[in-house]
Amino acid sequence: MIPFSPPHISEEAINEVVDTLRSGWITTGPKTKLFEKKITNYCGNKSTLCVNSATFGLELMLRWFGVAEGDEVIIPAYTYTATASTVIHVGATPVIVDVNSDDFNINLEAIKNVISSKTKVIIPVDFSGFPADIDKINNLVCSDEIVIFFKANSENQQKLGRILVMSDAAHSFGAEYHDKKVGALTDVSVFSFHAVKNLTTAEGGAIALNLPKPFDNNEIYAQLNTLSLHGQTKDALAKTQKGAWKYDIIEPAYKGNMTDIQASLGLIALKYYQNILSKRKQIFDSYKSSFKKFDWAELPVYEDNFRKSSYHVFALRIKNITEIQRDKIIKLIFDKDVSVNVHFQPLPLFSAYKNLGYKIENYPVSFDNYSREISLPVFEKLTDVQVDFVIKAVVDSVFEVIGG
């Protein structure tokens, strides 16, 4: 069986973890701080805080910005539940909009149609690692016609004076937009380093801060670091200094820090990350070269004149099929010993969001994309022979269902 997306853990990464275990420092410490600095240098943003998950990072930033009951946050229907659930956790309302038919990313006109005086944040999602068209979103929130709608309800909202743009960049670490890395494109970007991501720390994530003046991103980093440790003014590393045991709790906050064990994996993965991206692009290109021969294949967009993907998910769509036919094709592919997946089930398909009143009928593009989508295996150790095996399994399975 060819797996879908197993984690790639090198011997060097294992040795780095062992070094951490032997060091006597396994929680947040020097390796986490080093990992944060290396992410900042790689992405070109202003400061970075590593956390225990992208989910925690999204929620922490919503709370920092003062998003609360009565506020609205605009998100795409085509995303994982974390994008929406974090909004609900802080008491705000997710305003779910449809996506583009070509790149699966949030639709700009749909955003314009729902902005109101309650809108505090827009969370574009970089689907499959392909960046949303960020310049258009940034220009929108900074335009006079939109700024005039903005109503600040917190100190940080007052200081920014407009809607915050926070990229859900869970898929897009290493992706590029106009020759700039994701992380340095919006006010805030939140990465995931979950086990299935291109760069993994088993579980984990990072908040890439890139806020404009008058914000001091290093000062905000310090605030967020405190808030990620129960509101405690000193972390464990700081308390190791002579006589530095005493600390304060500035508010009853949350716990979401990354450990040095996790950071050890991240440090080695980041060291070779450009090689990882090159290998994943090679797999994408092989799939594209093979499937473009077939009239039924709708290929994903992963490069254009100003964007480069992180090559996280190869989202193949089959033209002119139903959801039932797609599911039959998936079963046949599995029967041929190839693991595939679907990214994503749009939020309004889930009971939790149906019960909140969201209806899939209001998101026709999202449903159409989902109903025909099959995500193919992409991982570092996938060989050329295995790629050919995957391609044959997909082609044969499609032929069995729709012929041609």
Image (spheres, rainbow, N blue to C red):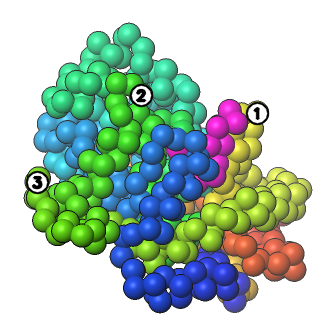
Residue 314 at x, y percent in the picture:
68, 60
Label 2, label 1: how far apart the Cα atoms are: 27 Å
Identify the disc placed on residue 305. 1
Query: In which quadrant of the rendered view does residue 228 lie?
Result: bottom left
* Magenta region includes residue 26: no
- Quadrant location of the C terminus in the rendered image: bottom right
Q: State the residue at coordinates (77%, 77%).
A: 382
Q: Residues within 10 Å of mark 2 (few under 14, many from 20)?
A: few
In the image, residue 77 lies at what x, y percent?
42, 47
Q: Please name the residue shown 51% across and 54% down the image.
A: 37
Q: Report the Cα–Cα distance between label 3 and label 2.
A: 26 Å
From the viewer's perspective, tell me whether residue 26 is left or right of residue 178. Answer: left
- Along the horizontal axis of the image, is 111 left or right of 19? left
Q: Residue at x 48, y 26 (%)?
A: 138
Foreground of the two, 148 or 43: 43
Q: Which residue is mark 3?
A: 251
Q: Is residue 53 above or below residue 353?
A: below
Residue 182 versus residue 117 in the image, above or below: below
Determine crowd level at label 1: few under 14, some 14-19, many 20+ residues with C-alpha closer than 10 A: few
Question: Can you tell which mark lies on residue 212?
Answer: 2
Mark 2 vs 1, N-terminal side? 2
Q: Is residue 147 left or right of residue 69?
A: right
Highlighted magenta segment, given as a residue range: 172-183
Q: Amino acid at mark 2?
A: Pro
Query: Mainly helix, strand or loop, the magenta region?
Result: loop
- Secondary structure type for disc 1: loop
Identify the element where label 2 is drawn: loop
